[in-house]
Image (spheres, rainbow, N blue to C red):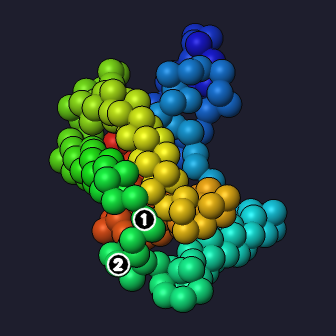
Amino acid sequence: MSGGTPVGGGGFMRQRHSQGYASSGDDIEDDACSRLRSFSPQSFEEEKRTWIEILENFLWIASAALIIYFGDRDSNLIYLLFHDERIRRLPLYLGMIGIGLNALIFIYTSILAWSVKRFDEKWGLKEWEVTSITALPFVTTFGLISFCLFTFALWPIWSFLTLPLLFTLFMACMVITPYLILGKFRPQYDEFRTD
């Protein structure tokens, strides 16, 4: 057996519960519970990438704010959605229903993920993971149908610019959504293993 301490008689004694023990990785079972985690600071490449991501996020949000503020140059987007006769109302409302269904699915799977305890199922998929996986085709379908309906509804105002405008608004929503979460999921480590 590798990764142990030699004892008299040519054998090795395993040190699974020793505080300072870190194996060489030879014994998979010992290595799984005794691997040291490094807490090194981020490298320069990771910091540079985060600044680029922050800049990209800012550009998406600023672009969406300009779209909402300027609208069609005469009035803002909110006023247009409520009062403009050029907009086809039925596709707009159906698209909003699709977005609402997506939001309900996201909220349901998020609440389900928060309520499930970590120790319920050790080796299989948890209930919220199965629900998230089975909900994924519905979320994708509702999203694509809603995007097409919004495009059809707003085409008389912006014509070809409708596609990049809607995509910019979608990306701004995707950038803002993680900041709306009340808490963060943190990796949980098994500090005290009994197996």
The one of 40 and 101 positioned closer to us in this rendering: 101
Between 131 and 186, the residue placed more toward the observer is 131
Residue at image x 56%, y 21%? 28
Q: Is residue 171 above or below residue 70?
A: above
The x and y percentages for residue 83 are: 35, 78
- In the rendered image, the quadrant that contains the N terminus is top right
Secondary structure, mark 1, is: loop
Residue under the image location 35 percent in, 33 percent down: 138
Residue nearest the viewer, comparing 98 with 4: 98
Return the x and y of residue 191 as percentages of the image width and height: 39, 46
Q: Is 11 drawn above or below residue 36 in the view shown?
A: above
Give coordinates of residue 61: x percent, y percent: 57, 75
Q: Inspect the image, locate mark 2, and give the three-letter code of the amino acid beneath it.
A: His
Please tell me how crowded label 2 is: few (under 14), some (14-19), or many (20+) other residues with Cα within 10 Å: few
Determine whether the residue tagged by mark 2 lies in a helix, strand or loop. Answer: helix
Local crowd at mark 1 within 10 Å, few (<14), some, or many (≥20)? some
- Left or right, 82 with reference to 38: left
The reply, left or right, for residue 83 in relation to residue 150 is left
Q: Is residue 110 visible?
A: no
Label number found at residue 83: 2
| The quadrant where residue 100 appears | bottom left
Q: Is residue 31 left or right of residue 54?
A: left
Residue position for label 1: 87
On the rendered image, what quadrant is the C terminus found in? top left
Q: Is residue 109 above or below residue 80?
A: above
Q: Residue 58's x, y, as percent?
A: 63, 77
Instruction: Find the distance from the CA under tag 1 to the CA under tag 2.
Output: 9 Å
Which residue is more in the foreground, 83 or 117?
A: 83
**Residue beneath the point at 60% across and 67% down:** 158
Three-letter code for the amino acid on which mark 1 is drawn: Ile
